[in-house]
Image (cartoon, rainbow, N blue to C red):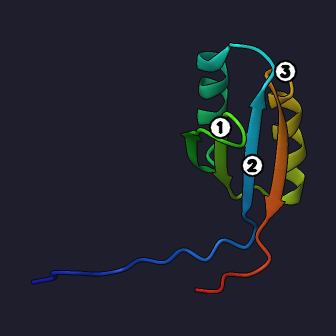
Amino acid sequence: MIERFTLTENLISEQFIFIYMNNSRFAEFEHLVSTFAEVQALYKITGDGCYYIHANFTAEQLEPFLQQITVYARYKVSHKLRRLI
């Protein structure tokens, strides 16, 4: 019997993207983001920004994604340097 286990995925490229909406087309934006397999999570947040995206785009994939979301929003992207814990 297996009672507990942990699966850790080592993503080479990870982004933390804060979204600042330019309009109120929230459903369209959420649908667009959900079509990208590289998006690990999409959160509606309070505080700094409207949404938070946790993703693992390659450098080649990230720019086209950002170009598509600029129809809806401005963004701030941070990249993972290394995992500490």
Residue flagged by tag 1: what amino acid is it?
Answer: Tyr
Query: Residue 57: x and y, percent?
Result: 76, 55
Secondary structure of the residue carrying numbered label 2: strand
**Can you see residue 38?**
no
Q: Is residue 73 left or right of residue 40?
A: right
Picture quarter with the C terminus: bottom right
Q: Position of residue 48 (x, y in %)?
A: 71, 43
| Residue position for label 1 | 51
Task: Tell me whether the residue at label 3 lies in contact with that at label 2, contact meaning CB atoms closer than 8 angstroms.
Answer: no
Please tell me which residue is depicted at 76% across the width and 14% down the height of the picture: 23
Going by the numbered disc 2, the residue's amino acid type is Ile
Q: What's the residue type where badge 3 is placed?
A: Val
Secondary structure under tag 3 reads loop
C-alpha distance separating marks 3 and 1: 15 Å
Residue visible at 67% across and 24% down?
29
Report, in whole angstroms, how far the alpha carbon at label 3 lies from the one at label 2: 16 Å
Task: Residue 2: give its label.
Answer: none
In what element is the residue under mark 1?
A: strand
Chain-order first, disc 3 or disc 2: 2
Dot 2 corresponds to which residue? 17
Whether residue 45 is visible, yes or no, is yes
Give the percent coordinates (x, y) of residue 35.
62, 33
- Say whether disc 3 or disc 1 marks the residue closer to the N-terminus: 1
In x, y percent, where is residue 37? 61, 46
Q: Is residue 2 above or below residue 58?
A: below
Q: Residue at x 84, y 47 (%)?
A: 76
Q: Nearer the viewer, mark 3 or mark 2?
A: 2
Label 2 or label 1, whichever comes before in sequence order: 2
5 vs 35, left or right, is left
Q: Which residue is mark 3?
A: 71
Q: Splitting the image into 4 quarters, where does residue 59 fall?
A: bottom right
Report how far apart the C-alphas of labels 2 and 1 lie in the structure: 8 Å
